[in-house]
Amino acid sequence: MSSGQPKGKILLIDDSETVLRFAHAKLEEAGYDVITTTQTVGAGRMLRGVDLVVVDYHMPGLDGMAVAQSLRAAARSVGAKPSFYLYTSDPQLLGQAQRLGFDGELTDKADYDALPRQVDAALRLARLRSLRGDRKP
Amino acid sequence: MTGESRPGASGDPGAKPKALSLGTKLWLAIMAVLAVVVVFVVSQLTSSVRTQLTESKVIAGSMVARLFAASVAPAVDFADEDAVRGELAKLKTNPDVVYAAVWDNHRRLIAEVGTAPAFPVAPEDEAGVVRSADQIQIMRTLPGPDGKALGMARVDFSLTSENSRFLAARRRIAWLALAVGLTISLLVAGLTKLQVIAPLERLIRATRQIEEGQQARVPDRSGDELGQLGRAFNAMSAAIADREARLADVNRRIQQLLDNMREAILVFDRGGRLGKVHSEHARALFGADALTRSTIVDLLYPTGNNAERTVEAQAFAEWVSLVFDMPLGRWEELIGLAPESVVLAPGTSAECVLALEFIPIGGDDRLDRVMLLATDETEKEKLTRAVKEQEETHQRQMNAMRRLLAGGGQLLVSMLSRSRDRLQECSSLVAERPFGAVQIHRLFQHVHTIKGEARSFDLGPLEAAALAVEDLLALLRNRVRQSDSGAQLGDLERLASLIATTRTELERAGDLLVRASPVGSAILDQITVRRADLDRVVSLVGSGSGSLGQAVRCLAARPFGESLLYLTEAVPSWGARYGKRVVLEVEGRDVPIPVELASVLPAALTHLARNAVLHGIEAPEERRGKGKGESGLLVVSARRVSESSDAVEIVFHDDGKGLDREAITAQSLALGLSGPVEELVFASGLTTASRTDLAGFGVGLGAARDELRKIGYDLILAPSDVGVRARIAPRDWPTESSG
């Protein structure tokens, strides 16, 4: 576990406890504050202070756009503005998440070494876009 | 004259029309000037010729008219109209005369001859000459004898022949002028070409050569302005060549410098376009081809067959875009959002980990380019992973050993002891001569048993070593069966070596057992007895002062490590609860603790450990700020105070921040207590912590000391430069120990 202030707060939503355990350990080791849940229902309560929400692409009952809308509405209700990313092991699904209302995808799901790098990139991308948005008149 | 045009411009429908060359313009100008001059000269000449012809006719005609006037004057004076007509008729015989007429001084027309003029002739016309395009009209006064005018005579002469001669002359002049003009223009054009155009064309060619990077000079032959221009051009060309040579030399040195650096160095500008300057390592890492065709984003995050970028590539592309749009003064803010590393070809045998450092290049608060220093940390990453895997493997082995111990360490101890004996027997068998099937069979039995038992206890390396011996024995057994010569010397040496390796793995397993054992090496000396039997022996002779009593008390003593069984796992857990990292180290695990001390020691050590975790050990950030390691350290050591006594001294020491003297003093005052801080901490009810599950009641330490004092021991806080140092020792033992 890294010391000092967490690099960000991450909410992981996956129906596999094993995935959650591995991902939780890897991200915590990298310095992130991580919370996990196997359910999309009720995940809205956990969104306060969250910087990034990562959702399993193949969650049972996941109907994509509705989940994204629901999570975004829940985030607004608690004053949170996280980024929402789908998590998949299929690189061919790159570019599909935005169609479903998400901000992007994290791929290489089986590679937990790659997960901290992708999370870091997603957080940086959100911050960069925010800076660019601030510059617009 | 060459028509000048820019290369590549011809044939392009959108291109501007070809410009006229200087030579053409000069030639056209010369031609225009010559044409004007020729036309002027020709017109002047022809005008002069016509005037000459006309005046000659006027002179001749004036003479004829004067003679006619003189000859007809007498006829007019005598009013002899017939004579007048006769004179007119004689005059008319002149082919140039087209009309003649005579008037008297009353302006009456006396007679006329020839074609009457189209306009009426007024007799009051004065004497003189009137010229027209094809005639000249001469009016003369008819002189009388007394000089008075008798009348007027007019004679009109034709200019037809003069006009014809004029036209002929004009044609000749025109042709001559044209020939002269063309000749002059050609001469001038040729001179211009030679003296102006050709030198300029040479200059243009030389300039283009310089533009293409070649050296160029122009001939230095003339002393005029073009010659001066040529000399100046040659000097400029030489200066450019010199500067380029020096620039190339500087670039070579820079390239050498870059190539000698360990990092892959690249430069990119707005849009991520890669510059031409890069280091040898960059070329080796990415390939020279990729460096000429890719952007920095595609270079670090190649998309392969997928046209979509990963989130890492998207983040980097956004950073590259934004960093050039922001003022240079915001670089420090933006550099924190750049990637610190990248993994090329992840998950493949060609995986490469690069640490990235970005350096701005620019001025006037504007970023021009960014330099990337990429350090290959693949080996370092592999080493880190290998160490981590080794640590994890070791931890798994330790955990496995602990589980074994929890399930009955004596079995393992006996197995290790028996295996040691078996390997000794094996060494003896290998040394026997002759060496044959009998020895091989007995060796097989021993090694097979060791292998099986190692597998049972999950001792992988020991099992593998025994298996290697088994394999060689199988080989030797076949060889001995097939031939009468027996095992070769080399085979026996190899066998002895493998047995030595097995012995080494056995010792390693023993070391692992001792490290995992909470009682240390004492685990190897322990045997299992019934507690009831031991208690009976102790009660019968344990209180005696002689050697028998001492031996029985020693038999009942517990290894110091047993007192810390609980703390070994609890201390890190307590630390984690408060966001701290704490490690417990134990020295003297196998030191025997007298049974009476062993019953109260765990409580005292627990209180000391809890206080250290709660009050003493700092949070990782605070420890870093003090230059300490992130993990706090609790060290507990035990030693026998002398060989002749079973008394022990136990020292507890942590590397935290020590006693909070101010808080303890304040609390003591509030409770009406006074004294040294090292004594006040034992006071009942005194605590500087809020109540938690770890501490806060202020009774533990004092109670623990009371229990120790009941059995003849004391708990003393000793002076320490770092943290808290507590000592548990017999009450009559000196306060300063050598430990």
Image: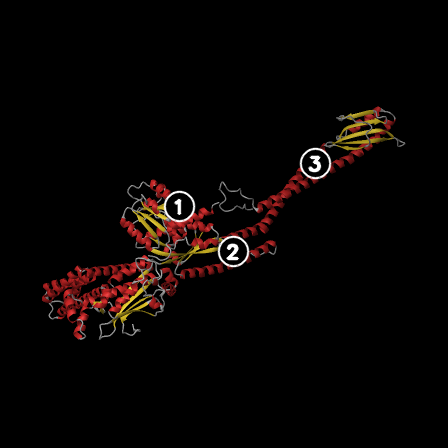
Where disc 2 sits, the SS reads loop
Quadrant position of residue B547:
bottom left
- The residue nearer to you, when weighing B567 against B165, is B567
Amino acid type of the residue tagged 3 in the rendering: Phe
Q: Quadrant of the C terminus of chain B?
A: bottom left
Mark earlier in primary sequence (3, 2): 3
* Residue B216, label in figure: 2
Q: CA distance from mark 2 to mark 1?
A: 72 Å
Left or right of residue B22: residue B458:
left
Indicate the amino acid at tag 1: Gly
- Check disc 1 and report its element: helix, strand or loop: loop
Q: Residue at x 29, y 63 (%)?
A: B700
**Disc 3: which chain?**
B
Are marks 3 and 2 in one subunit? yes
Say whether marks 3 and 2 touch (CB < 8 Å). Answer: no
Image-quadrant location for residue B336: bottom left
Give the number of the mark in front: 2 or 1.
1
Answer yes or no: is residue B308 visible.
no
Residue designated by label 1: A79
In this view of the protein, which residue sits in the foreground, B287 or B672? B672
Q: Which mark lies nearer to you, 1 or 3?
A: 1
Q: Position of residue B482 (x, y in %)?
A: 10, 63
Disc 2 marks a residue whose amino acid type is Ala
Residue holding disc 3? B166
Residue under disc 1 on the same chain as residue under disc 3: no
Please state the chain letter of the residue tagged with numbered disc 1 in the rendered image: A
Residue B363, image x, y percentages: 50, 55
Label 1 and label 3: CA atoms lie apart by 111 Å
Residue B289, percent from left and from top: 38, 52
Q: In the rendered view, does B199 fall on the left or right side of A101? A: right
